[in-house]
Amino acid sequence: MAALCESFTLRGPGPGGGGPGLCLEPGPGRDLVLLTERGRAATLFKISDQKPLGCWSVKHGQILTCPVVCNFETHEYIAVHDDKVLRIWKNEDINLDKAFKATLSADVYRIHSLPNGGPVVLFRGGGVRTLDVLLEAPQQEIENIISDEVIRWSGAFMEGQQPVLIFTTEKGGDFFVYVQKPKLSSLHKYKLEQQEASKPLCFTAHITNQTVTLLCLYSNDSVYQVLIPLQQDTEEEEILSKSLLLNFSVPGTVLKGTSLVVLDKDHIAVLGSLAVPGKEPRECLSIWNTKFQTLQTSKELPLGTNGQLWCYEENFFLIHGKVLTVIMYKCETSSLAAAVGKLKDSQNPDVSSFVNWNTLEDEELVVSFQSQESVALKAESKMNLRSRRSTVAKIQPEALSVGQLLLNLKDASTYVLETELRQLMSKAPTPDLQAAIGCVVTALTDRCKRNPKYYPQNFLLEIVETRDLSYSLCPDLMAVALEKKDMHLLQICLERFPDIPEEITYACLKTFLSISEAHLQNIDVNLDSVICYIDVESDDKEVKTEIVENGFSAEMDQDMYDTKIPKEAQSRSDGESCPVGLQKAALLNAVLHSAYTETFLLPHLKNLPAQEAILFLRYLYYLYVKCSEKVNTTLPGIRSPTINQIMDWMCLLLDAHFTVMVMLPEAKELLSNLHKFVRAQVRFYSELNKIEGSLRELQRLNHLRESQTYSIEVLEII
């Protein structure tokens, strides 16, 4: 029996969306995958943490032309850009421009890396080389064996100790299969038997007992199987016959497959479009049992996909909408009882709920509820089969009412919708509480998209403030809030959501900086993070002639610089007065608290307009000065920014806008004051270190006196 389990978002929306240039390869260890985006970068992800561990990109003007792979023997990464330039680097390398480089004599189609066989390079002309042989002479001539044919698919496998490369080509509607053993210089070419009125769309293969099993997904909604023996003596071209393995025949529906992967000897997964008469086609992921010709399970993907599907370590990877989604699955031993769903469980499985944290649909909530109830029933070991079935029959209508309620509320009035959704949240069972809340938020955001005049601000605020949500559970919520310019909701989401994509964080920052102070005066914003250290009457107070900050005074500053700044300019830019109002400061503090990865945030920050970047830097400088006034360098208030957060954002902003900061006059003055203040801080802490050294010396002398030893010591304090 096969089942699709819970899913989660591995990567949020990228600048390029979910285009066809994406490719996934296994990483250097378990729970690691490499994502390559054509023309941009390669990112190493840790699946369980749902976070990137590293990112490497080529410089401007270069294009990655094949997926990045990992050499499992050396734990190095291999990439090809501009078709012929080979790059090899290690995990600790940052700049790819300084990595190992080799220019090859022919265009590379793809690199396949095998755990025990090393990387194998396939060229566009059909030539194959192992990486070791290729690096011995990068400019060696590569034979062209496929002439006018175009490679459509390739895969690498291990047969004993020998790597085997298989690739398919197309020429004039005819398809050919090549099987190569690069270490033995063995090559066999086959022609695929033609199928009337249909053609292959996708290929996959596996090797068992010296035989290659090639699976072909055809446009006539069928999967065909081709067997190719590896022990072949003849070098003549043969025609391969194929046999029907599976037909996607579901009563009342038609499945148009686009991608195919093999799960085990009896199960395959198909990504495609499910067409029902009278309804629009819906994309779905399904698992089929090839032994008994049955559909095991399926999952609808309402946001659409790009047609690509990968499978590693019992995880499916696909682009759902604009995010990279992971869907876990499990496959049990194939038997007739399992194929028809009558397999009797001999053990009591652990309770688990299948919750879609990305786009939870009504039907999925029903499945989740049913799974919980069925597991609870199985725990009753003394219950006979007849009573168990009757109990399930009683529970199903109650479970179905949750999903049916959401479907019925799509066209309900605002009052009825919010009333019913509040009741749904209050009655949700504990194991599926998050699932119910996700359905509620999804229903509300969907209605906001359909009806621009509808926006339940108070209800959404109530949900976010009282429930433990995440961005992955309701990815459209912040997008709707940005569209409606709901600053309060964005502030709460930034403070509470732990997994906000960097693109959304930047969008919030840009919105906060661009909105006028007058508009913010009429908006309800939480001021707990700023009310304790920003003086609302600072404009009416006189500027102090001397400010003592962490032991640093203006006299110490003048000792280091001969140039003087007018008092008016100094009072305006030395950080004494806040450059933004209370509401905007509170919103910016929420951005400072949000989690981010520097590699992914920096490209977005470079798009921040110059004046807004300077305003943000002024506010960061103001916070830095305020932190330095305190002995413990901590700002008062609830959820106030820390000194480390302030410094990290300041460095990130300067990295993104270094040229702008140097060229603009108002930025020059700000940078000068910032540099002066930082140097004064460095000098102050240097003096503290000297005092600390003197105190340690005094402690050592005191220890010598206690041990009844006598000495003459000369202590000089500089």
Image (cartoon, rainbow, N blue to C red):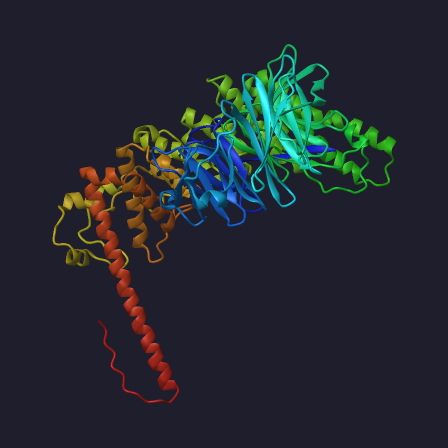
User: Quick one: 544 or 511, which is closer to the camera?
Assistant: 511
Q: Could you tell me which residue is drawn at 34 percent across and 43 percent down?
A: 652
Left/right of residue 465 with respect to residue 81 in the rendered view:
right
Q: Quadrant of residue 377?
A: top right
User: Quick one: 674 or 418, which is closer to the camera?
Assistant: 674
Where is residue 246 drawn, in percent x and y?
71, 23
Where is residue 539 drawn, in percent x and y?
23, 40
Q: Is residue 606 visible?
A: yes
Where is residue 87 drawn, in percent x and y?
42, 42
Q: Quadrant of residue 602?
A: top left
Q: Is residue 596 visible?
A: no
Is 151 situated above or below 210? above
Location of the N terminus by quadrant is top right
Where is residue 10 drawn, in percent x and y?
53, 37
Left/right of residue 212 with respect to residue 481 in the rendered view:
right
Question: How many numbered marks, from 0 up?
Answer: 0
Left/right of residue 118 with respect to residue 564 in the rendered view:
right
Q: Could you tell me which residue is drawn at 35 percent across and 79 percent down?
A: 700
Is 515 situated above or below 576? above
Q: Quadrant of residue 473?
A: top right
Location of the C terminus by quadrant is bottom left
Left/right of residue 194 with respect to residue 69 in the rendered view:
right
Seen as rendered, the residue at the extreme top is: 278
User: Quick one: 74 or 94, which is closer to the camera?
Assistant: 74
User: Quick one: 567 or 475, which is closer to the camera?
Assistant: 475
